[in-house]
Structures are given as structure tokens and as C-alpha cells.
Image (tube, helix red, strand yellow):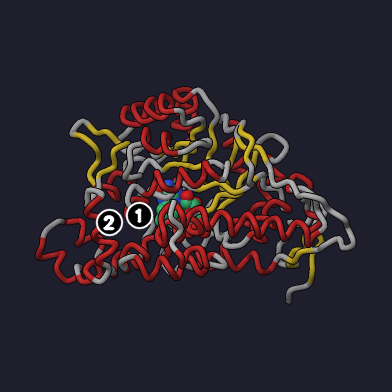
Amino acid sequence: MLLNRSAARAVNISDLRELARRRLPRMVFDYIDGGADAEFTLRENSRVFEGVRLRPRCGVALGACDLRTRGLGHELELPILLAPVGSSRLFWPRGEEAAASAAGRARTAYILSTLSGTRLENVSAASSGPCWYQLYLAGGREVALRGMARAKAAGFSALVVTIDTPVAGLRERDLRNGVRELLTRRIGAMLPFLGQLALRPRWLLGFLGDGGLMTFPNVELASGPMPYADVGAVLEQSVVCWDDLRWIRDAWGGPIAIKGVLSGDDARRAVDTGADAVVVSNHGGRQLDGVAPTLEVLPEIVAAVGQRTEVLLDGGIRRGSDVVKALCLGARAVLVGRAYAYGLGAAGEAGVARALEILRADVLRTLKLLGCRAVAELDPSYVELPGSWRGACRGGAKSYRDD
Ligand SMILES: Cc1cc2nc3c(=O)[nH]c(=O)nc-3n(C[C@H](O)[C@H](O)[C@H](O)COP(=O)(O)O)c2cc1C
């Protein structure tokens, strides 16, 4: 694995983001970087971490710190998993395989999106670690059954069902960049937007060498793999309701996480439906703009179901201290999306490995500075929350005045 020299020098996730911005065409970079509507929730997801203050215990002698956690039956070396990120093949040739391989080397889990451009069998073969499969009911239950059977046969050990996507969010950057027009494959409509691809010849060569315009090979419709242009319409017809979740649980017969939970009520319902884990997620601010940042709703969800199930969180994580804050507030582990997608866009597998290494070193350093020897020992007493987080201070977190 050749580590691109600039990616090796990346000090933080922002550096990887900048490298990805320079290598990718604008429409691909904005697809990763952007959010829904006014991008309020996208910004808040990261900003909220700044409001949570750390309360170290100094003068504590620590040996090696223990970063291990467990997730859906797996021992993970890091409390950081790779979130499902659709169409990763746009960022780097066979991008899903590259990311899964980096996750396996870091001894953590990779979650493959239904809407990936790479066959799930190849992704599982590329990773030496656990792989989980994220399910959309794209194409209906029969199509989902085929996907689940293939995932099981290929060794995917858990299913992650996303419930926050009854319709694709409005990503204004995608509209401005001509994503719709580029997918029509009609040269007249595409022409005004082709310049951004020509400006990135190295990316273009890699993309064309990897087969060019994609299908979704894990969504096998009667007519063949789902074509790329159909995705918006398909999502609208694939709403996952609670009845579907019961059906999915029985059809899968293994561990299930429900992703996209934002309230204690929905978390309870998810657990009553048979979820082994819930992922507190607003889809990285890409779906309903205006919902609360995930870290802020985490205490409510931990209070509702933390004793009965594993609680994971994603959204806005760019630093190891963000990971630590989420764990202090009761998350078992976090998922990162953009943090590794920037690395993938910057330098492929080496870039994902660098993103994970940056976050791993950050978490380790933060633990040492906090005076805590293991991620499993983090608790709310290590943080201080803004006073505006009504009712979130149960369980030991202090609050400070933020007016
Ligand atoms: C480019 C991109 C594509 C995504 N595709 C999917 C997907 O196919 N399925 C899904 O459940 N979530 C998807 N997500 C959401 C992520 O799984 C995750 O919830 C989100 O990225 C977390 O926020 P973060 O990017 O700030 O870490 C996607 C996110 C991004 C950035």
C-alpha cells in the first residue's frame, strides 16, 4: 500500500479534506462534503462537540491505554467504525474494497452501503476484519432477500438497517453541480457540466479505468443490477417501516442495528422490534435539515435504551476528542463517514488508513490527557455540558452556563 506523500503528511482530517478537494471533481467532492438544504444540521453536528468541555483528572500515572470495545459480538481494536457511504467507487477505483481493507487492517468494522458500486463479495474478501451490510429496501422485499442471502453467504456478520431515508434529502450542491444532468447520459444536457471532470484528468482516468458510470451490483432487479440514475426514485419506493423491520429481522436471523434513531421513543421501538444496537444518526445532515445534532440527543437515547442495547453514534466526528466525548455520554462506539471518505478521495486505501491512524492517535492522546486508562472507563463525569442541554445532565455530567 503506497502512502501518497501528501496524505502521509496530513495532520488532521481537515488536511485530508483539502487533499480530496484538490483531487476530486467538484461534483464528487461536494457529494461527500455537502448536506441537505441549508446545511444547518451538517454544521451543527460538528459544532456541538465544541460546546462539550472535558474535565481531566491530572496526576494520574497510566500505562498503555486500552482502546478496545465490543460491537454486535465483535471485539474491535478501536471504538471507531466506518459508516456506510454509498458510491465510494466514485472517490477511488474499487473504493469500497479499499476502505474495507483499511478497516480490517485497523481491526475495526466496515459497513457496506446497499448503494455501493462494488460487489459485496469482493468487499468482504478485501477485509480481514468484520464487515456489516447496510440495508435499504431498494427494489422491494424480494430484491432485499437476495441481497441479504448474498451478504450472509459472503460473511457479513450484521445488518444495519437505515430508517431515515423515506426520500432522498435535497442536496443543493448536487443540483448546482449538474449531477442530474450528468446521469441522463444525454450529451446535450451533460455538456455544460463536463468541464469539472476534465479539470481532474487523474481522477477521470482512474474512474474510466474502473469501468466508468456505475450500476449498483448488490441491488439485483429483474432487469439486472440497478442503474445509477434510478436511485432517487428507488429510495422513495423503499421506505422502511416498523413492520418491515420485523420482517427484516426474521429474514436475516442475525444481529441487527437500526440506524437513524433520533429520539428515546424511536430507540425504545427499535429495541422492542428486536434491534441489537441503535445508531444515533441524522445521516450526517444529509436528510432532514433542522434536526438536532446527534451528540445532543445521545443522552436521551442512552437513558431510554442504554441498559438494554448497544448505542452507537455518528455525525460530525472529525477528531479523536469528538470520539471521546461521544463515549463519555454513553455511546459504545462511533461511526465515521466523511472523515474516512475524505481520506479515500485523497489517497485511496492509504488515505483511509491515515484517517483512522489520525483518529486513533487522537483518542489515545485524549485518554492520557484525561487521566483515563480505557475507553470502557469513560463516563459522563469526564465532561461538562452547556446549560442549554435541558435534562441531559443525568448520569453525572456537569453543566456550565453558556448564556
Ligand atoms: C457521501 C456519503 C454517502 C452516504 N451514503 C449512505 C448510505 O448509502 N447509507 C447510509 O445509511 N448512510 C449513508 N451516509 C451517511 C453515513 O452513513 C453517516 O451516517 C454519516 O456520514 C455520518 O456523518 P459524518 O459524515 O459527519 O461522519 C452517507 C454519507 C456520506 C457522506
Residue 264 sits in which quadrant?
A: top right
- Say whether residue 62 is left or right of residue 66: right
Q: Residues within 10 Å of mark 1 (few under 14, many from 20)?
A: many
Left/right of residue 383 with respect to residue 127 in the rendered view: right
Q: In the picture shown, does residue 127 fall above or below 342?
A: above
Give the Cα distance between marks 2 and 1: 7 Å
Determine which quarter of the picture holds residue 55. Answer: bottom right
Quick one: 31 or 9, which is closer to the camera?
A: 9
Tell me the element at label 2: helix
Query: What residue do we see at 75% from left, 56% from top?
Result: 367
Q: How many marks?
A: 2
Q: Which residue is mark 1?
A: 92
Q: Mark 1 and mark 2 in contact (Cβ < 8 Å)?
A: yes
| Type of amino acid at the residue the image marks with label 1 | Trp
Q: Please name the residue that numbered disc 2 is placed on.
A: 206
Residue 294 is situated, as x and y percent measured from the top left of the image, at: 59, 56
Q: Is mark 1 within 8 Å of ligand 1?
A: no
- Element type where label 1 sits in the image: loop
Q: Amino acid at mark 2?
A: Gly
* Identity of the residue drawn at 51% across and 63% down: 8
